[in-house]
Image (cartoon, rainbow, N blue to C red):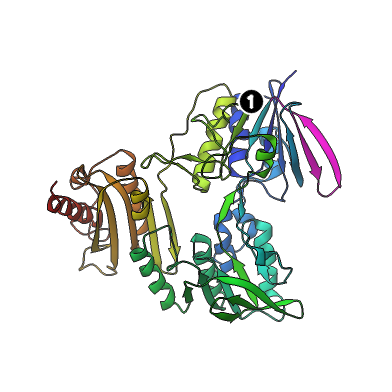
């Protein structure tokens, strides 16, 4: 009989594992069954703000591969609208509920891939049943929000709760649709993934587009009128709203695994080894937003929910189940986003991360331009570097600027990944032409400034 592989979760990590395993083993050797409780497989949740704004016209443009494509091209038994409700490790079976047929099925497994993703953070007040309040984690969420925005009476005032990646991107999307937008963030700045001085640059740019930024303010509840959202209640008073979008972040979706006895790490994610196996549980693997992984700079276990990691981790699992050998080496937290016309990039540790990890360090800010100063379209960017003292090893970097700013973080990520010092970075052979960079690229200017700062502290 063929070995049976069950995948719990039909998005990036789960279906990457399934398709990679299938490329290496045919159905006669490996039967693959994937359970997905939603309506879509392998889609880009990161693209939802651009669909909402209208920049991406069609929902299906965000779908990388449909359930039928997995069935036809990979011979994978994809069972949509099936929610796994229990995992029995002793009997080696999963229990799933058919959400449309309202029946329960039990399926045995030899190998299990746990890829349940993340769940949105939901304070108690979000559980109030008020029409006009939306998360944006799935395509179904996006469709519901679009329907509300296009329904009469059309909303005019939006409140976005939470100033992370999703929050700032959704604020921009709603402005582009012509709504008046207020963003409420409990912290002192939006974009807490960067340091406060860089986050303030983001806030200034958002205010420049007409987005109201309310920081240091906690949401305490919702006010309704005739069953529809009317205002968001905060510690500073009510804010009128006829649509509310939640961007409060996510947590690993581990409840099912925890109930089955899978180990949970200090970050809250499922613990895995470098091959993405769940330690102490033979035949069980996990990947994606539900797991924790190693931060290569701090050495600490972290939860960094990004589609890039999920796809790579799923591929590692598929190679291993398929008979090969692969490992996932960890993360450094590289991410980019666009906020109106502003681009934001970050990699490695923030100042508070470096402090928590016990590093001594220096930080520098370097102002430069994306192109030669005389070339048309040259615009400012700010590069921030954090370097270990006295070694000079790069610990983290952040960039905020306009055109061509964010992707410069990739050069810094490669330097960080390979343990380069800022002194070594000053000699990097980066591309130069007036339309693309000054003679001294902003990355090199920042590295030189960091070398000077280290020399001033007794390096």
250 sits left or right of 453 in the view: right
Is 215 situated above or below 252?
below
326 sits left or right of 112 in the view: left
Residue 31 quadrant: top right
Quarter holding the N terminus is top right
| 339, 404: nearer the viewer | 339
292 sits left or right of 426 in the view: right
Residue 32 pos. (x, y %): 70, 30
* Residue drawn at (35%, 64%) of the image: 198
Residue 5 quadrant: top right
The answer, for residue 56, to whether it is visible in the render is no
Find disc 1 in the rendering and name its residue: 283
Residue 19 pos. (x, y %): 61, 34
| 84, 403: nearer the viewer | 84
* Residue drawn at (42%, 68%) of the image: 189
Residue 88 pos. (x, y %): 74, 32
Tell me if residue 105 is in the magenta stretch.
yes
Is 204 situated above or below 135?
below
Residue 309 pos. (x, y %): 50, 43
The answer, for residue 201, to whether it is visible in the render is yes
Q: Is mark 1 on a helix, strand or loop?
A: loop
The residue range painted magenta reads 93-110
Dot 1: few (<14), some (14–19), or many (≥20) neighbours within 10 Å?
some
| Residue at the top extreme, as displayed | 1
| 98, 429: nearer the viewer | 98
Secondary structure character of the magenta stretch overall: strand
* Residue drawn at (20%, 42%) of the image: 424
How many numbered discs?
A: 1
Tell me if residue 229 is in the magenta stretch.
no
């Amino acid at each position: 009989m063929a070995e049976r592989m069950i995948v719990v979760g039909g998005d990036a990590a789960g279906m990457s594992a399934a398709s990679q395993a299938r490329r290496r083993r045919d159905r006669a050797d490996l039967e693959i069954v994937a359970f997905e409780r939603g309506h879509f497989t392998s889609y880009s949740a990161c693209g939802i703000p651009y669909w909402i704004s209208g920049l991406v016209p069609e929902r299906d443009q965000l779908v990388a591969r449909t359930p039928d494509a997995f069935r036809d091209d990979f011979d994978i038994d994809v069972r949509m609208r099936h929610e796994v409700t229990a995992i029995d490790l002793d009997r080696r079976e999963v229990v799933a509920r058919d959400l449309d047929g309202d029946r329960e099925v039990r399926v045995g497994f030899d190998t299990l891939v746990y890829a349940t993703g993340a769940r949105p953070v939901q304070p108690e007040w979000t559980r109030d049943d008020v029409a006009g309040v939306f998360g944006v984690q799935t395509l179904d969420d996006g469709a519901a929000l679009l329907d509300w925005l296009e329904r009469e009476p059309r909303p005019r005032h939006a409140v976005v709760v939470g100033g992370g990646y999703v929050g700032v991107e959704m604020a921009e999307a709603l402005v582009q649709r012509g709504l008046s937008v207020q963003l409420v963030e409990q912290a002192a700045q939006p974009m807490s993934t960067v340091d406060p001085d860089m986050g303030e640059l983001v806030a200034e740019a958002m205010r420049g587009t007409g987005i109201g930024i309310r920081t240091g303010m906690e949401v305490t509840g919702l006010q309704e009128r005739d069953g529809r959202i009317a205002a968001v209640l905060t510690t500073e008073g009510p804010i009128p709203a006829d649509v509310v979008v939640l961007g409060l972040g996510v947590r690993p979706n581990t409840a099912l695994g925890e109930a089955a006895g899978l180990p949970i790490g200090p970050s809250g994610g499922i613990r895995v080894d470098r091959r993405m196996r769940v330690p102490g549980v033979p035949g069980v693997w996990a990947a994606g937003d539900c797991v924790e992984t190693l931060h290569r700079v701090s050495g600490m276990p972290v939860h960094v929910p990004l589609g890039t990691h999920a796809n790579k981790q799923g591929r590692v699992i598929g190679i291993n189940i398929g008979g090969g050998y692969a490992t996932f080496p960890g993360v450094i937290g590289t991410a980019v986003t666009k906020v109106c016309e502003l681009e934001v990039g970050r990699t490695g540790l923030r100042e508070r991360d470096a402090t928590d990890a016990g590093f001594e360090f220096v930080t520098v800010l370097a102002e430069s331009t994306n192109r030669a100063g005389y070339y048309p379209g040259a615009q400012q960017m700010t590069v921030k570097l954090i370097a270990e003292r006295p070694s000079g090893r790069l610990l983290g970097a952040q960039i905020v600027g306009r055109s061509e700013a964010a992707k410069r973080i990739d050069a810094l990520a490669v330097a960080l990944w390979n343990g380069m010092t800022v002194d070594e970075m000053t000699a990097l052979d980066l591309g130069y032409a007036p339309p693309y960079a000054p003679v001294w690229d902003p990355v090199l200017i920042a590295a030189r400034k960091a070398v000077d700062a280290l020399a001033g502290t007794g390096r």
